[in-house]
Image: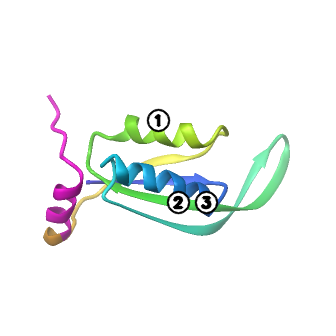
Amino acid sequence: MRIYYVTLNSAEQASQISRVLIDRHLAGCTNWFPITSTYRWEERIVEEAETVLLVKTQEGYRDAIEDIIRQHISYTNFIGEIALESVNESYVKWMDSEVPRRFKD
């Protein structure tokens, strides 16, 4: 399984992206929450509110997930892939029923 950590500008964007990912069976579950980010942009230090979207899915869906995100936003954001070392068996079974596993060739 994988979790994608995605930064967005708003909860509305997270909701819209989540519904598409779930509808297309690219994610089994998503969560989002507000954060505050500090970074350098055009030689200034900026601090602003953002939303983190967590996408719970199977291995092999990164390109498809990124394509959906790009359809909803036009700015540079962070999309990080986290490989899970261990997940409880009952959740794995549920995820397998929601998002098909892709096997590497």
Spatial CA distance of label 1 from label 2 is 16 Å
Residue under the point 18% across and 64% down: 94
- Three-letter code, disc 3: Glu
Q: Secondary structure under badge 3?
A: helix
User: Horizontal and vertical percent for residue 71?
Assistant: 55, 37
- Dividing the picture into quadrants, the one containing residue 70 is top right
Q: Mark 3 points at which residue?
A: 12
Query: Foreground residue, 84 or 68?
Result: 68
Residue 58, percent from left and from top: 26, 50
Q: Mark 2 points at which residue?
A: 15
x 15%, y 71%: residue: 90
Question: What's the CA distance linking mark 3 and mark 2?
Answer: 5 Å
Q: What stretch is highlighted in magenta?
A: 91-105
Residue type at tag 2: Ser
Q: Are marks 3 and 2 in contact (CB under 8 Å)?
A: yes
Provide residue 72's location: percent of width, then percent of height: 58, 43
Which quadrant: the C terminus?
top left
Judging by the rendered image, the residue that carries numbered circle 1 is 67
- Quadrant of the snapshot with the N terminus: bottom left
Q: Find out whether residue 16 is within the magenta segment.
A: no
Q: Which of marks 1 and 3 is in front?
A: 3
Between discs 1 and 2, the one toward the N terminus = 2
Residue at the spot 40% in from the left edge and 50% down from the top edge: 21
> Vertically, is 46 above or below 91?
above
Q: What residue type is labelled 1?
A: Asp
Q: Is residue 101 magenta?
A: yes
